[in-house]
Amino acid sequence: MLYTIQNDELCVQVRDHGAELRSIKERADETEYLWNGDPSWWKYSSPVLFPIVGKLKDNKYRVNGQEYELPSHGLGRISDFRLLEEKRDRIAFSLLWTEESLKKYPWKFELIVAYELHGRQVKVIWTVRNHDDHEMIYSIGAHGAYRCPIVHGETFADCYLEFNQEEDAPNMPLNAQGQFLRTAGDKPLKGTKLPLNFEEFKDDVLAYHNLRSDKVTIRSTKSEKSLSVIAKDFPFWGFWTPSQGGAPFLCLEPWHGHATTRISTAISPSVRAASASQPVGNRASPIRLRSAEQIKKTNQKTGR
């Protein structure tokens, strides 16, 4: 089911399947900022990645000697959420563990996804709760696909990404199975601007670790329309458009965690827990959550 929230500046649509944003439209001139999910390119528009980010090796992992299987990006984007709250400018959904989910992910979790409108900003709030009696491990990330270019008649190459801090970071290359390698790639991010062209994405996602920036903006050299994603304290960022080139969107993706050859075959809940408000800072950065604790993560989307 599709729901609408709005204020004087924006009209936003969200569906209960995946608790996924499906439209972010500016009311003044009807500018649409979000990709519409046309399956001829990509059927999603802004999926929530939970409890994994990326693709496990052979889609399998082990916990305490037991093998489990999860699809790419986990359960969140393929599940029906329950409506928790609906107001004119706020909506919230919940995904709760089931006996069926325990066969794929052996923790009793709850994922709450909320959207709030504040002027020209969409605030996205994730709340993860551990309803189990032992530590829970998970990753979480955003995969918002934004129109690029935003203005009709412009091209992808007219656009660039702007970072709010000077950057000097190597990219994280993927192997053929979709896991990140423990080596530096040949597409470093330097300075505050990344010009866009489809050739840069022919090998899949451009991903970076420990960027200084917490705000990334899609801008054009030919018009003033722009869109920003603000995500504080996320250790990884990914930028993706289909590798064949030509798609009219770009994904801006802050992550906690990612697919890796080292962690995909063995996830152990016996690792010492970190504070729920201080996610682990290791390479794959899964979040370890003790029972009765919860963590909220916010990423914000603004357009003008």
Image (spheres, grey):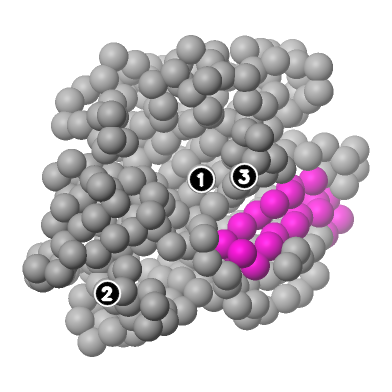
**CB atoms at circles 2 and 3 under 8 Å apart?**
no
Q: In the picture shown, does residue 175 fall above or below 296?
A: above
Query: Looking at numbered disc 3 in the image, what kind of residue is underneath it?
Result: Lys
Give left or right: position of 52 versus 125.
left
What number is the disc on residue 106? 2
In magenta, the rendered stretch is 7-25
CA distance for labels 2 and 1: 24 Å
Q: Nearer the viewer, residue 200 or 104?
A: 104
Q: Where in the figure is residue 278, as x and y percent of width and height?
A: 27, 61
Quarter holding residue 130: bottom left
Q: Residue at x 41, y 30 (%)?
A: 205
Q: Name the dominant secondary structure of the magenta segment.
A: strand
Disc 2 or 3, which lies upstream in sequence? 3
Q: Residue at x 66, y 35 (%)?
A: 40
- Dot 1 falls on a residue whose secondary structure is loop
> Dot 1 corresponds to which residue?
143
Q: Residue at x 38, y 69 (%)?
A: 295
**CB atoms at circles 2 and 1 under 8 Å apart?**
no
Residue 140 seen anywhere in this rendered image of the structure: no
Q: Where in the figure is residue 74, as x and y percent of width and height?
A: 40, 58
Disc 1 or 3, which lies upstream in sequence? 3
Q: In the picture shown, does residue 302 fall above or below 274?
A: above
> Dot 3 corresponds to which residue?
43
Q: Where in the figure is residue 186, as x and y percent of width and height?
A: 29, 14
